[in-house]
Image (cartoon, rainbow, N blue to C red):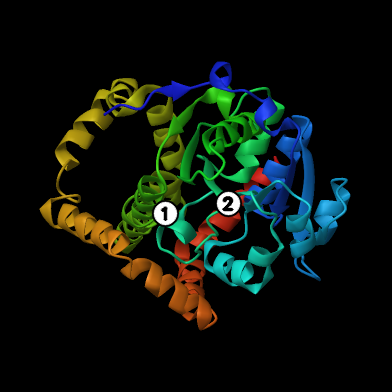
Amino acid sequence: MTNPILTDADIDPSAIHDKTVAIIGYGNQGRAQALNLRDSGVNVLIGLRPGSASEQAARDDGFAPLAMTEAAARADIVMLLVPDEVQADLWNGGLADAVRGGATIGFAHGLAIHYGLIAPRADLDIILVAPKGPGKALRADFERGSGLIGLIAVAQDASGSARATALAYAGALGCGRAGILESSFQEETEADLFNEQGVLWGVIPELIEAGFDTLVDAGFAPEIAYFECLTEVKLLADLIYERGIAGMRVAISNTAEFGAAEGNGRIVGDAARAEMKRILGEVQDGSFVNKLMADARAGYPALKASRQRAAAHPVEAVAARMRALRDQN
């Protein structure tokens, strides 16, 4: 079923304009959302842990950061914009007791609610507002007068107005300028976690590295391999975004299009598609989240090892040289 696309015309902005929003965390999403909300006329508080590395950034932006529990206690809407794996500890470590009765608790990703890491009180509205892009893009598009497409969802509607709150919040971020889709905590969470592993952040970088290695091992210059296998990914992404996959093929040369047809199915074959289904299954049965939480509790050994492997790949040295050349011009 196709979901209708909602815009500013479908939003009653007064649903949040008389309310105070506490942004818990001032990182990628926290900063962008706080600034967009403030520019939209919403009263915003920033809640941070003592000694947070983000405190000075918040002060530089004109906010006066508070302790997380104090910000939550003073707010009608509390947005948890800290990393997924620490949300439950913060919630159970004081935030749950600090929030007002009848408040709205919001998330930009549904993981903590969908997998039961947070069990909210029955008197609270639980909403999801998920801009489909990083905070930097959310802020930049807002300042240009446009916005990012966003998803909204309601997991608990104690007040009867949770949907209106979610829509108004998304509109204040600028998402209503581009389009808002209604989803669910389950759909947003599972689709996003699958994409991160099975398509975007997991597979595409691995394909780039594999292509780079193949060319360099065959005697091609690393710089040539870098340009062919890495920089042209941006061209591909831009064309697909503007025209769709079929439209992208029309925009490239006949040689490139014929090469795409010849390569189709040779890398992403039945085995790859079966592995995608396995990845989705691990997302849906909770085993991926169990691994994430275990790694977080242990100090992120698996995540740190993955970062080290990525940093050590030869393509990174070439990329650094090419960026240095670009920045000189």
What percent of the width, then of the height, locates residue 272?
19, 55
Query: What is the three-letter code of the residue carrying label 1?
Result: Trp
Query: Residue drawn 21% across and 35% down?
Result: 259
Q: Which residue is mark 2?
A: 124
Tell me residue 250's x, y (percent).
29, 20
Answer left or right for 14 relative to 310: right
Query: Residue type at mark 2?
Result: Leu
- Crowding at dot 1, Cα within 10 Å, few <14 / some 14-19 / many 20+, comes out as few
Q: Is residue 301 visible?
A: yes
Taking depth in this image into account, of 98 and 115 the one nearest to the observer is: 98
Indicate whether 69 appears above or below 59.
below
Q: Is residue 201 above or below residue 310?
A: above
Distance from disc 1 to disc 2, alpha carbons, whole Å, reads 34 Å
Q: Residues within 10 Å of mark 2 (few under 14, many from 20)?
A: many
Work out which quarter of the rendered image holds the N terminus and state it: top left
Percent position of residue 316, x then y: 51, 61
Which mark lies nearer to you, 1 or 2? 2
Q: Which mark is residue 201?
A: 1
